[in-house]
Amino acid sequence: MSPKSTSCYLLANFLLASLWAVATGCGEKPEPATVPTTEVDPALTMAPPIARTIEIQMKADDPNGNVFVFADFGKGVIKDQFHAIMVAEEKMTLRDDGLGGDSIPGDGVFTVALQEDRLATEQLLEKTSESTNKALAAQPVFVGRERVDAQGQLKGMRPFDKDLFNKGGRVRIPFPTLCTPVSDVSIPHSIMVTDLGVVEDVDRTSQPCTRPNGTGAWTFGKLMSDMANEAASGVAPQDFVKNWLRQWMEPQTVNSDAVPARTRIFTDVIRPWVIASGAAPGSFDENDWESKDLDLAKAPFKLTAIVNRLDLRGNTGYSVTNAGEGRFVFEVLSSTCSPTAFTVIFEYGIPINKCGTLVGYARKWYDLRTLTLGSPEYNTALQAITDVFAAANADPTKPNGSAINQIRTNEIALGSPWELREFHVDATSHHLIQAPVVNEPAKKFNARANPAGNAADVTVLANWVNTVFPSNSTVPLTFNGAPFLGGKSHTEFNGIWNAAPGQITDPANRHLFSLGTCSGCHGGETGTTFLHVGTPAFGTEAPLSRFLTGFTMNDPVSNTPHTFGDLERRQQDLARLLCACTGRRLPDMVQVLTFKPINMPH
């Protein structure tokens, strides 16, 4: 071989060897890559970036770690090169800067290096791959609130490639979680409790006509007394309730939206209650009734359901500022203790701010399945769960020390149309005051509710749905400098929200926005006649809407079929929550990167 040929041969072999070293990770050992200080952003709790795919790769000789996780969020979704999350109580930072094991800077695939046991990781991936496919084949699959084709989801699943993993290849992690969820969450025990042995418990609930009770743990009187928390607020429970009732008798303006009085609150609710409290029928009228006693033991409210809404929580990878809710559903009774078309829902935030504690609390809900519904043992265990959010001083960081987020009402008993209102405890006055209804713009922005109204208002709605809603589904108090959120929710337009024909460009966004409103969720978007929990007579269990129990309907605008079954969705969500905060970094990280909050109020 000539010297020239020899040189070419050596050069060629050198280049091949270099390429092989790059391809296989051999050659010069990479240096550890530093990660800048990056803070977790709590604003992402309810709207976190969600990884489209997650891949994992073993790199035994890398000083940054031996297991690399690649989370593909999509290019441009995360603006910075670094993204911090909380995994249990540990902060971890993913990078998209082309260093520390990251492949291509700025491609939207964020990387983090972990030190993990290779064999244990392999076994975890193998087991999860099998269990995920079995679970998808055996139970409904939900995307948001909607049930979707499980087989279609299975087509997108790849079985764990053990050989590729052991050879150092990148392997896709099976969704939705590196955990085998429990399969026996009981809806009637742990999600929607309507059993008569619970909601008509003689010690904890009230029948104002035959066994008045103002101190039982689940009575209207006790819950209102604890919400007023006179020792902390200086507001007597009677005054707290009277002030709430008075607001129905007077016109209100809430966020510039006019809310007319519902004057029948006096004749149908207040007057019979004051008389039952001991006042003579002719001794007061609508102007001076507040001078009379209002016996909270005689409150005309019947408990119909206790509801677990941990599914409303945020993503714990960004903070545990929203741990979901616990709820009591009451119906308003007539003077003869018959049901009326009027419900009042107490919606409490769960006052827990650590992921591990939240999972432990969720397990208490889950464990109720082992007890007989309505038995003394079950009711005692359930009260211990509800006391966490309902008792006085449950959350000292909030007004009156109460964990209440809001009280919502839904009624047509006081006049037409069906109307929903919302009330918050005011930090200054310590009273309940009427607030804008969350996630629902003022009625004037809806073309269906106001077809002859101002075209500019309808255009505002279309602009918001087209430009803001796809990235942030929370309806703001104001939009473009003007009031936007409504002061009440009306359903005379069958609870369907839309702009002028063709103004909203994506029919799916129209549906999802409308579904997230009070009127849409309780009306045409779910095929519901305004109440998800019905108003039964004593001795009868509350009926539930088809949206909760499961059915398929066509979109009222696009005619696209939608399948709902929200109790099953909540059932699966509780099972998934029990897989969080295991103390194992890889499974806990996958939970954070793939959990998308429902971010709806109902």
Image (tube, helix red, strand yellow):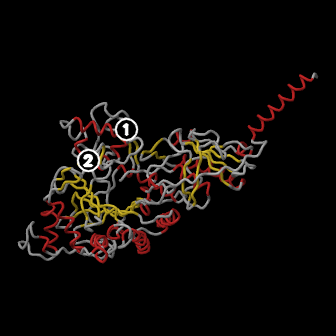
Amino acid at the residue labelled 1: Thr
At x 33%, y 43%, the residue is 514
- In the depicted structure, whether residue 296 falls above or below residue 128: below
Q: Quadrant of residue 492?
A: top left
**Badge 1 is on which residue?**
467
Q: Quadrant of residue 527?
A: top left
At x 89%, y 22%, the residue is 4
Residue 520 in the image, given as x and y percentages of width and height: 30, 46
Residue 303 in the image, given as x and y percentages of width and height: 30, 66
Q: In the picture provided, is 202 more to the left or to the right than 48?
A: left
- In the depicted structure, whether residue 103 falls above or below residue 345: above
Residue 578 in the image, given as x and y percentages of width and height: 53, 60
Quarter of the image where the N terminus is located: top right
Number of numbered markers: 2
The numbered dot on residue 318 is none
- In the depicted structure, whether residue 278 falls above or below residue 553: below
Amino acid at the residue labelled 2: Pro
Which secondary structure lies at badge 2? strand
Q: Quadrant of residue 382?
A: bottom left
Q: Nearer the viewer, residue 145 or 62?
A: 62
- Answer with mark 2 or mark 1, whichever residue precedes in sequence: 1
At x 44%, y 60%, the residue is 321
Give neighbour class at mark 1: few <14, some 14-19, many 20+ (Cα, 10 Å). Answer: few
Q: Nearer the viewer, residue 174 or 101?
A: 101
Q: Nearer the viewer, residue 102 or 355?
A: 102
Which secondary structure lies at badge 1? helix
Residue 407 in the image, given as x and y percentages of width and height: 29, 61
Q: In the picture provided, is 152 more to the left or to the right than 251?
A: right
**Marks 2 and 1, how far apart at CA:** 18 Å
Give neighbour class at mark 2: few <14, some 14-19, many 20+ (Cα, 10 Å). Answer: some
**Badge 2 is on which residue?**
483
